[in-house]
């Protein structure tokens, strides 16, 4: 039987428990989920793509249903390359929906066989974004409970060289 594979793309700079919530819930629908870290030339990340991949691998350690990868270029090309047709995207607010709907529509226009699955982030995490996590951490704020322990450790190292 053919495995159902979904691609969960994002910058994940860094991965949060909001991302993890979407990931683990999507594993209830798919046999494998590829966490695909996007090279985004418009965004300068705090962590390199390789660092983000290592952090995600540590955060999901032991889960053989999660594959960590990266990609450049069009998402539709990557999805086809990995023999998938499903993309998973998390939504926190109405503003997320507008952007994500536009992207999903463009992707569908480029590849009629590709579908995007939208999942609402759990109420416990809807206020979390990678940007706010980085801002809080940069001022020495406590991000425990909002990100996996490996992320909290890496943020401290990045900002305070401890």
Image (cartoon, rainbow, N blue to C red):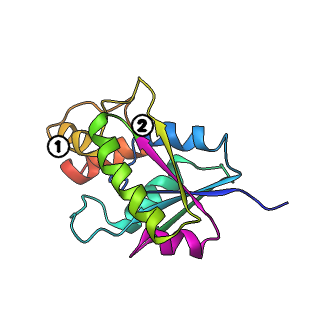
Return the disc, 1 or 2, that comes first in the chain's sequence: 2
Q: Does residue 53 appear to the left or right of 34 in the view shown?
A: left
Q: Label 2 crowding class (10 Å Cα cut-off): few <14, some 14-19, many 20+?
A: many
Secondary element at tag 1: helix
Question: What residue do we see at 58% from left, 40% from top?
Answer: 24
Residue 93 rendering spot, x and y as whole percentages: 31, 34
Residue 22 rendering spot, x and y as whole percentages: 50, 40
- Rendered view: 37 above or below 82: above
Q: How many marks do you count on the picture?
A: 2
Residue 14 in view: no
Q: Quadrant of the N terminus?
A: bottom right
Question: What residue do we see at 58% from left, 76% from top?
Answer: 81
Residue of label 2: 18
Indicate whether residue 33 is drawn in magenta.
no
Q: Which residues are magenta?
A: 71-90
Q: Does residue 150 appear to the left or right of 6 in the view shown?
A: left
- Residue 59 or 90: which is nearer the viewer? 90
Which label is found at residue 113? none
- Residue 31 or 112: which is nearer the viewer? 112
Quarter of the image holding residue 135? top left
Residue projecting furthest to the left:
139
Residue projecting furthest to the top:
123
Q: Label 1 crowding class (10 Å Cα cut-off): few <14, some 14-19, many 20+?
A: some
Residue of label 1: 138
């Amino acid at each position: 039987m053919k495995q159902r594979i979904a691609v969960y793309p994002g910058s994940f700079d860094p991965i949060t428990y909001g991302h993890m919530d979407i990931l683990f819930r999507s594993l209830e629908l798919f046999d494998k989920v590829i966490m695909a870290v996007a090279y985004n030339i418009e965004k300068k990340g705090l962590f390199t793509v390789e660092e983000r991949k290592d952090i995600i691998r540590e955060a999901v350690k032991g889960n053989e249903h999660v594959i960590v990868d990266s990609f450049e270029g069009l998402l539709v090309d990557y999805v086809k390359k990995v023999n998938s047709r499903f993309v998973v995207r998390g939504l926190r607010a109405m503003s997320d929906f507008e952007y994500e709907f536009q992207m999903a529509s463009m992707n569908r226009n480029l590849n009629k066989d590709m579908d995007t699955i939208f999942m609402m982030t759990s109420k416990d995490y809807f206020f979390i974004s990678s940007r706010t996590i980085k801002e809080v951490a940069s001022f020495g704020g406590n991000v425990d409970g909002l990100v996996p322990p490996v992320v909290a450790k890496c943020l401290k190292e990045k900002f305070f060289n401890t």
